[in-house]
Image: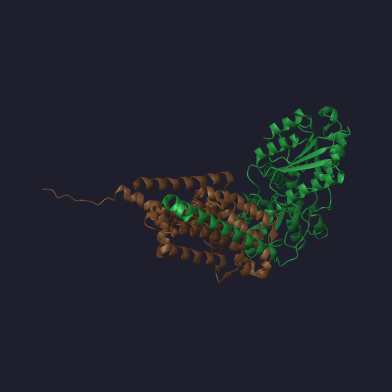
Amino acid sequence: MQGRWTDNKEVGLAMHHSLRSRRSLVALTAAVALSGAALAGCTNTGTPTSTNAGGGDAVQQTVKPDDNGPTCTLDQYGGTAIDLSDAVVGFSQSEKEDNPFRIAETQSIEDEAAKQGVKKFIKTNAQSTLSKQVSDIQDLIAQGADVLIVAPLNSDGLEPALKAARDKDIPVITVDRKLNATACTDYVSFLGSDFIEQGKRAADQLIAGTGGSGKVAILLGASGNGVTTDRTKGFVDEVQAQAPGIEIVAQQTGEFARDKGQSVTEQLLQANPGITAIYAENDEMGLGAQAAIIAAGKEPGTDIQIYSVDGTRNAVEQIAAGAYNGVIESNPRFGPLAFATLTSFLAGDAVGQDIVIEDGEYDPSNAADLVDNAF
Amino acid sequence: MSQTLTVALPRRATVVGFFQRYGVYLAIVIVLVVNLAVTPNFFTLDNVRVQLVQVVPVLIVALGMALAIGTEGIDLSVGASMALAAAVIPLYIGYGVVPAALIALACSLLIGLANGVMIAVIGVQPIVATLSLMVAGRGIALLVAGEQLRSVTDPGFLALGRGAIGPLPWSVLIAAVLVAIVAVLVSRTTFGKQLVALGGSRRAAELAGLPVRRILLVTYLLSAALAGVAGVIGTARLGASVPSTLGNLVELSAITAVVVGGTPLSGGQVRVIGTVAGALLLQLITATLVKHDVSDAYSQIAQAVIILLAVYIQRGRAVQR
């Protein structure tokens, strides 16, 4: 080898170079893999791990009563009757499953599909990318999906995918976020919470808890998100109507994230030392606010009250511990309701176009008993 | 015969140069004066503490970013390094605070290693190499965490984020020590001189026989390690490991802090104290906007204007040169 290359110094150098690179790369890869394996083998969390991620057999969703809105039947929508046990069911999840809501939602739909014994269940995750959700849905159709359950990433933008489903008369049930499209034409029904109502109920909890007076700061969700707009509107309107003694001193976005909720609350508590309560538009920001209140040397739950919307286990546990005041649930367990709706629809019965779910609520009187319902 | 009197007017270039060099400090003074006039409770010890505590993660990340930018590179994967460190903490906190923190740092060093190997050995452009780890690193962090948020309740660990020695929070103290170390590293060590030389002209550095690959590798290791420290402190402050959101967009804040602080994106210079000032300025501006309940849309625009100004100043310097 040496003899062959000595006459061409440049090639020899290059060879040497790439060999050395490769050797060090191999060594590095090995080191990475070894240390990874070594670390993975001996974790020590120091606390018993709780295993209620999916909230498997916790409370299921109930349809809100006296829902006499428009309905939809198989005849109106078009398409063929099929038994669920012969059907390929596709589920398109919108966001990354890095938050409890999405994890519980997917788990619930997957569990119910297994329980109903569908012929085949296929799920996709758009990873918070709209274009991926469009192609996900088209893929599901290409894979022979007979019915689709879609958790839309956005109210708009799924038109090409919906059209593909429409062309094949595939029934589409949308969950949790409502589409800007015509029910019973572009899709069958929408299953979800009334976000304005959630904001209103959070306001009712806060008014009751504070006695209808004091200074309140709102931690808004992500800007430009329909959920943020609705939860704000419901809350602000209710406070103005029911509790003129409550002053809303700030509305700042915490982007639905715990760390943003924390840093924004720290700033607000500094600027407005008189704040007596915080309304966070999801639990994560509420828990961030709780950390900020502790850092400011005050007692969360007593000195400054915290109310939020979601119903995650972490927040409900804090209510039970007395360091959090109220949570309005936004129920993610769409599985049973979605499949019940599909079953009656495919059997030719009329189903509601807007199926609004009854969300629960947690307060200090029930949190300890209901903590296992949280997701 | 009339006597001529010459007055030494400062040359225009000198004035521009002054603003380029000291603009960030001037801006801090302006923001402070504005707040003195219009923001209640701004000049209190508690508020100073809040601002310092909040600036710590971005500041620490920006120190590493300044080094990467000094080599004419960039490190977009710092948020992922933070997330990975955060994801690892709850898995090992049972061994104690120090071991858990060290393991977290080791994990973020793996990201630095991958960056360094790609950039120094294989020759991938820094923006591409670190972009790939920005995406992959957070994915790995989510996998490590089982895509779950975990509360961390170890009191010793929480003290790291919330505790203080006298009036000085631990996290601020750690940041101050790191600033001092990086400042000495850049200005007083061979490595620092080599880093700056490499950023000035890679070709010249290679011809001069500098260990270019080693410098690059160490730079990206340092950047990842500093981001790891920020991830550990951020987790301690939250009392929870949130790999899905911790450090989101921190790379942009860090780059802005570095650039506003006077380090040119073209490399060959590292301004450590300027970077500190840049991070502080961003923090103070955010604080001012939040305290006055300015809506999100306007505060985003305000931040964009500041970045534009910084870039404009950078452009001025390049032209001058």
In the picture, one chain is brown; tell me its letter: B
Nearer to the camera, A91 or A1: A1
Residue positioned most to the left: B1
Q: Chain A's shade in the image?
A: green
Residue A97 percent coordinates (x, y): 71, 49
Quadrant location of residue A267? Answer: bottom right
In the image, A229: left or right of B49? Answer: right
Residue at horizontal 40 percent and vertical 65 percent from the top = B188
In the image, A48: left or right of B301? Answer: right
Residue A363 percent coordinates (x, y): 78, 56
Nearer to the camera, A44 or A338: A44
In the image, A137: left or right of B176? Answer: right
Nearer to the camera, B107 or A15: A15
Q: Is residue A229 above or below residue B168?
A: above
How was the colour assigned to the protein in this rendering?
A: by chain
Residue B145 percent coordinates (x, y): 68, 57
Residue A55 percent coordinates (x, y): 80, 53
In the image, B272: left or right of B289? Answer: left
Q: Is residue A324 above or below residue A220?
A: below
Answer whether residue A82 is visible to the viewer in this image. Answer: yes
Quadrant location of residue B85? Answer: bottom right
